[in-house]
Image (tube, rainbow, N blue to C red):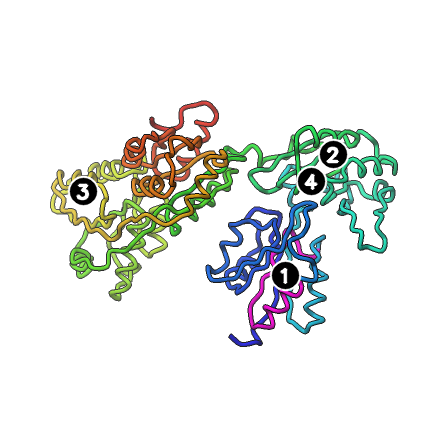
Amino acid sequence: MSEARGRVFLVGAGPGATDLLTLRGARLLRSADVVVYDALALNDLLAMAPPEALRINVGKRGHEDPTRSQSDIEEILIQHARAGKRVVRLKGGDPFVFGRGGEEFSACRAAQVPCEVVPGVSSALAVPALAGIPLTDRRFAASFAVVTGHKDPTRVREEIRWAGLARSADTLVILMAMRNLAEIADRLIEGGRAPDTPAAAVMEGSLPGQRVVEAPLEVLAERVRETGLGSPAVVVVGDVVGLRAELDSWESLPLFGRRVLVTRPAATAEAWVGALREAGAEPVAIPLIEIVPIVASPLLDAALADWERYDALLFTSANGALQLAGRARERGLDPRQLSVPAHCVGPATARAARASGFAVGELPLAGYNARALADRLLAAGDLGGRRYLLPQSAVGRRGLADALRGAGATVDVVPVYRTEPAPFDGQALRASLAEGALDAILFASPTAVRSFAHGLGADPREICRATVVALGGATAEALAELGLPADVQPESATVEACIEALARAWSGQQGGSP
């Protein structure tokens, strides 16, 4: 690696939610050699970096003692850049908004190390918005000010002019204020702010653990103390806080504040993680299984040798579509040029098939499962003489093939992959379950259930208080054999059905089929 490539990127990570990282920030993370990060950085963000990238924690939370001094941090950046590394300095919010990004940029410049800043979504703007608090509104506020509530003893002019701020801006956004909140409120009131000015403290803004305390300014610190609200938090003072009841939309999401463990393979977990996050949940992705292609397959070789002879392809999983496409391309075949339609079970499978280049036919009219697909094909007319290719797991169920064969069709069932238990940190997962840190676990296959039982290192019946979700009958049977019966079994194995079933279960209604 050449020394000329060494460079430091000061990347704003945003307020916390992974999907509020900028596209440029994500791109730089994915190409980083070294990631130097603050305590506010989420594991999901760090996971974007290459597995071989060096990760260095230099952060602190609240008023803890820092793990590294500021000069140490600057030296780390400079040393790794001089060694020819692409260094991403991942900072919460925006690097130049109370992030000491200017100091780090200056240090790199003084050391003649190339440095770039990548702006981030500042918590000063994002957190109030996600709590339903606009910083300006023509009815209430034409100006706002952002200020730190943390005194820095190294500053020559330590005192913040609270009296001036109290009178000059309609809305005040105060970062790092929790330790001095009572004093700040007193100073603002002394400076002219009305004691009954609406105010709010927002903890863990943009994350599913977001909590908000609203109160008049004069009693906000007391209310915060009573509710146990802690750092990190953003404090907003001004009449715009009164709009929160009208404008808040995030906390009313169906799974807001719930931590949901997604156990699907890494290749198919991303869509589930995104959908759960949009529903307000905090998804935790721990793949319990991995997809292993079946390399030596005379059946597949024979099918691909003349795949135009089929009347349709049948995909019962996204992995079936992905694996068939991959094996076809290895043989110089292009799914985009195949004239044979593909029939899929569920929207996720259809998306994977389309992304792989297959021409996808319409979905089942009711229910996203193999039975619904069989019913639709049977209802379409006489199947005598029709030929289908069904690529699936080595342990896939035979119900779809049997139903079509019973109607006179020929179905070539070709195993294209198998699922195997994936290694995971059983001790960490065991601790999360014992602490009640997970609200739900989504199991997508019997193999995932067996991997969970084997790798956990404890009897799950004794420590699992989370809602257990089974996708499909075979998965529910595997859980029952383990002695951990499913609490929720969605009507179909889609993320949308899971979200709906969990929302019903947690609202006291029945969550899917028992």
Residue at left offset 76%, top offset 37%? 181
Q: Nearer the viewer, mark 2 or mark 4?
A: 2
Asked whether disc 3 touches disc 4, contact meaning CB atoms under 8 Å apart, the reply is: no
- Label 3: element kind: helix
Residue at left offset 43%, top offset 48%? 270
Q: Amino acid at mark 4?
A: Pro
In the image, residue 384 sits, relative to residue 7, either above or below, namely: above
Mark found first going from the N terminus, 3 or 1: 1
- Label 4: element kind: loop
Measured Cα–Cα span from mark 3 to mark 2 = 63 Å
Q: Callout 1 environment at 10 Å: few (<14), some (14 to 19), or many (20+)?
A: many
Residue at left offset 74%, top offset 42%? 177
Question: Which residue has dot 4 on it?
Answer: 134
Where's residue 419, x and y in %? 29, 48
Q: Callout 4 environment at 10 Å: few (<14), some (14 to 19), or many (20+)?
A: many
Question: Which residue has dot 3 on it?
Answer: 401
Question: Which residue has dot 1 on it?
Answer: 10
Q: Amino acid at mark 2?
A: Ala
Residue 199: mark: 2
Mark found first going from the N terminus, 2 or 4: 4
Residue 21 seen in the current view: yes
Q: Nearer the viewer, mark 3 or mark 1?
A: 1
Magenta span covers which residues? Answer: 74-96
| Residue 81 within the segment the image draws in magenta | yes
- Label 2: element kind: strand
